[in-house]
Image (cartoon, helix red, strand yellow):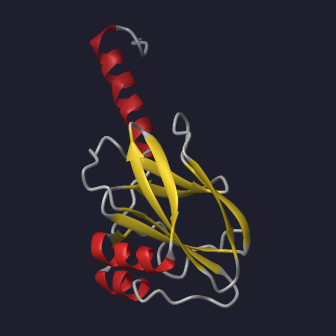
């Protein structure tokens, strides 16, 4: 009987299993369809929710400076330079943050019908969040970024 962990075959099995577990934990987020990207760049508000745009204009960032975005402890997805997320939220206070060693955080207060823009730059694995004026945020999102989808249309949950 061959035991896992013994010999080359056992090591290969363990390496393959570890790789599968690591890949399963990746937070891969696809780009949205061009139609969806154009739709959310119309910046329409919702009377019963706040809308949050989090965008990464930091094109000089290395791919290694990936950041995983959470809002109130809920996973939104991995951010990349030149991309953005649009998130519908219930009105009230919210905490944007990274995970693990990433100690970047920003508290934002939102109101129904309000659109909030947050610029996200990543340096050395730390998320640097900054709330941005609406006019500046709109221009930045249109000029720099493509939408990332973390849920398929119709499945996007309203975060509490």
Q: Is residue 17 above or below residue 122?
A: above
On the question of residue 32 being in view, the answer is no
The image quadrant where one finds the C terminus is bottom right
Residue 101 vertical placement versus 160 (above, below): above
Quarter the N terminus occupies? top left
> Front-most of 126 and 38?
126
Residue 12, position as x, y percentages in the image: 30, 21
Q: Which residue is at 55% across, 36% downward?
A: 100
Relative placement, left or right, of 74 versus 44 is right
In this picture, residue 149 sits left or right of residue 45: left
Q: Residue at x 36, y 16 (%)?
A: 10
Residue with the most extreme top position: 7
Identified at 42% across, 16% down, the residue is: 4
**Can residue 52 be spotted in the picture?**
yes
At x 47% / y 75%, what residue is drawn?
A: 152
Marks counted in the figure total 0
**In the figure, 78 relative to 82: above or below?**
above
**Horizontal arrangement in the rendering, residue 105 relative to residue 56 (left or right):** right
- Quarter holding residue 131: bottom right
Residue 44: percent from left, percent from top: 51, 90
């Amino acid at each position: 009987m061959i035991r896992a962990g013994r010999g080359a075959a056992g090591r290969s099995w363990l390496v393959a299993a570890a790789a599968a577990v690591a890949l399963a934990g990746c937070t891969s987020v696809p780009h949205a369809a061009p139609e969806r990207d154009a739709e959310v760049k119309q910046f329409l508000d919702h009377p019963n929710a706040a809308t949050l745009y989090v965008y990464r204009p930091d094109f000089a960032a290395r791919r290694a400076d990936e950041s995983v975005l959470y809002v109130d402890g809920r996973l939104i997805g991995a951010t990349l330079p030149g991309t953005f997320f649009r998130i519908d939220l219930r009105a009230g206070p919210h905490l944007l943050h990274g995970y693990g060693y990433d100690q970047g955080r920003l508290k934002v207060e939102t109101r129904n019908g309000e659109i909030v823009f947050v610029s996200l730059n990543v340096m050395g694995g730390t998320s640097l969040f900054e709330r941005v004026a609406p006019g500046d945020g709109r221009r930045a999102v249109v000029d720099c970024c493509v939408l990332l989808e973390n849920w398929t249309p119709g499945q996007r949950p309203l975060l509490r």
